[in-house]
Amino acid sequence: MKPTTVNNTSQSNEIDLKFILLNQEKEELISLILGLSEEFSEIEKRIQFMYAPSKDEIALSKKLIREYITSAKRNGFIDWRHIDHDAIKSEIA
Protein backbone atom coordinates (compact mmCIF):
# COMPACT_ATOMS: atom_id res chain seq x y z
CA MET A 1 0.00 0.00 0.00
CA LYS A 2 1.45 3.40 -0.95
CA PRO A 3 1.34 6.33 1.48
CA THR A 4 -1.15 8.98 0.42
CA THR A 5 -0.18 11.85 2.70
CA VAL A 6 2.94 13.01 4.46
CA ASN A 7 3.14 13.90 8.14
CA ASN A 8 4.13 17.59 8.05
CA THR A 9 4.74 17.79 11.81
CA SER A 10 8.29 16.43 11.58
CA GLN A 11 11.24 18.78 11.25
CA SER A 12 12.62 17.12 8.12
CA ASN A 13 11.13 16.28 4.73
CA GLU A 14 11.26 12.57 5.48
CA ILE A 15 8.07 10.58 5.84
CA ASP A 16 7.33 9.66 9.46
CA LEU A 17 8.15 6.03 10.32
CA LYS A 18 4.84 5.56 12.14
CA PHE A 19 3.00 6.77 9.05
CA ILE A 20 4.90 4.36 6.81
CA LEU A 21 4.17 1.41 9.10
CA LEU A 22 0.49 2.31 9.42
CA ASN A 23 0.18 2.16 5.64
CA GLN A 24 1.60 -1.37 5.30
CA GLU A 25 -0.30 -4.62 5.08
CA LYS A 26 -0.16 -6.96 8.07
CA GLU A 27 1.73 -9.60 6.07
CA GLU A 28 4.38 -7.06 5.06
CA LEU A 29 4.88 -6.01 8.67
CA ILE A 30 5.19 -9.63 9.81
CA SER A 31 7.72 -10.28 7.08
CA LEU A 32 9.68 -7.17 8.07
CA ILE A 33 9.77 -8.16 11.74
CA LEU A 34 10.81 -11.74 10.94
CA GLY A 35 13.58 -10.50 8.66
CA LEU A 36 14.88 -8.07 11.28
CA SER A 37 14.73 -10.73 13.99
CA GLU A 38 16.83 -13.07 11.84
CA GLU A 39 19.42 -10.33 11.43
CA PHE A 40 19.29 -9.06 15.02
CA SER A 41 18.67 -11.78 17.63
CA GLU A 42 17.94 -9.13 20.28
CA ILE A 43 14.74 -8.22 18.45
CA GLU A 44 13.53 -11.82 18.50
CA LYS A 45 14.32 -12.14 22.22
CA ARG A 46 12.58 -8.88 23.04
CA ILE A 47 9.42 -9.84 21.13
CA GLN A 48 9.33 -13.28 22.73
CA PHE A 49 9.78 -11.76 26.17
CA MET A 50 7.14 -9.06 25.65
CA TYR A 51 4.44 -11.21 24.06
CA ALA A 52 4.99 -14.72 25.42
CA PRO A 53 2.14 -16.30 27.36
CA SER A 54 2.52 -15.70 31.10
CA LYS A 55 3.35 -19.37 31.73
CA ASP A 56 6.47 -18.95 29.56
CA GLU A 57 7.45 -15.60 31.08
CA ILE A 58 9.49 -17.12 33.91
CA ALA A 59 11.36 -19.47 31.59
CA LEU A 60 12.08 -16.64 29.15
CA SER A 61 13.23 -14.36 31.99
CA LYS A 62 15.63 -17.02 33.26
CA LYS A 63 16.96 -17.59 29.74
CA LEU A 64 17.47 -13.84 29.21
CA ILE A 65 19.32 -13.47 32.52
CA ARG A 66 21.52 -16.50 31.80
CA GLU A 67 22.41 -15.15 28.35
CA TYR A 68 23.27 -11.75 29.78
CA ILE A 69 25.46 -13.27 32.50
CA THR A 70 27.20 -15.52 29.99
CA SER A 71 27.99 -12.62 27.69
CA ALA A 72 29.09 -10.31 30.55
CA LYS A 73 31.41 -12.57 32.51
CA ARG A 74 35.15 -12.74 32.04
CA ASN A 75 37.20 -15.54 33.63
CA GLY A 76 34.11 -16.66 35.58
CA PHE A 77 33.38 -13.23 37.05
CA ILE A 78 31.34 -10.19 36.08
CA ASP A 79 33.21 -6.90 36.43
CA TRP A 80 30.74 -4.63 38.22
CA ARG A 81 32.21 -1.55 36.53
CA HIS A 82 31.02 -2.87 33.18
CA ILE A 83 27.50 -3.97 34.04
CA ASP A 84 24.82 -2.26 32.03
CA HIS A 85 22.14 -1.85 34.72
CA ASP A 86 19.82 0.03 32.36
CA ALA A 87 19.88 -2.82 29.84
CA ILE A 88 18.93 -5.33 32.51
CA LYS A 89 16.12 -3.15 33.85
CA SER A 90 14.66 -2.48 30.40
CA GLU A 91 14.68 -6.13 29.43
CA ILE A 92 13.09 -7.27 32.68
CA ALA A 93 10.51 -4.47 32.75
Image: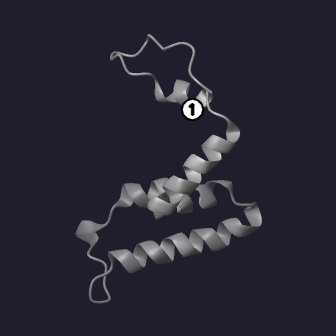
Q: Residue at x 56, y 47 (%)?
A: 32
| Quadrant in the rendering for residue 12 | top left
Of residues 10 and 83, the one drawn nearer to the viewer in this rendering: 10
Q: Residue at x 51, y 62 (%)?
A: 38
Extreme residue toward the bottom, this view: 75
Relative placement, left or right, of 81 versus 32 is: left
Percent coordinates x, y for residue 23 in the rendering: 61, 27
Q: Residue at x 66, y 70 (%)?
A: 58
Q: Residue at x 46, y 75 (%)?
A: 67
Residue 93, visible in the rendered structure: no
Residue 28, visible in the rendered structure: yes
Q: Amino acid at mark 1?
A: Leu
**Image quarter hosting the N terminus:** top right
Extreme residue toward the front, this view: 2
Of residues 77 and 2, the one drawn nearer to the viewer in this rendering: 2
In the image, residue 84 sits, relative to residue 70, either above or below, namely: above
Of residues 33 and 58, the one drawn nearer to the viewer in this rendering: 33
In the image, residue 56 sits, relative to residue 87, either above or below, namely: below
Percent coordinates x, y for residue 89 in the rendering: 46, 56
| Quadrant in the rendering for residue 69 | bottom left
Q: Residues within 10 Å of mark 1 (few under 14, many from 20)?
A: few
| Quadrant in the rendering for residue 3 | top right
Residue assigned mark 1: 21
Percent coordinates x, y for residue 9 in the rendering: 43, 12
How many numbered marks have been drawn onto this rendered protein structure? 1
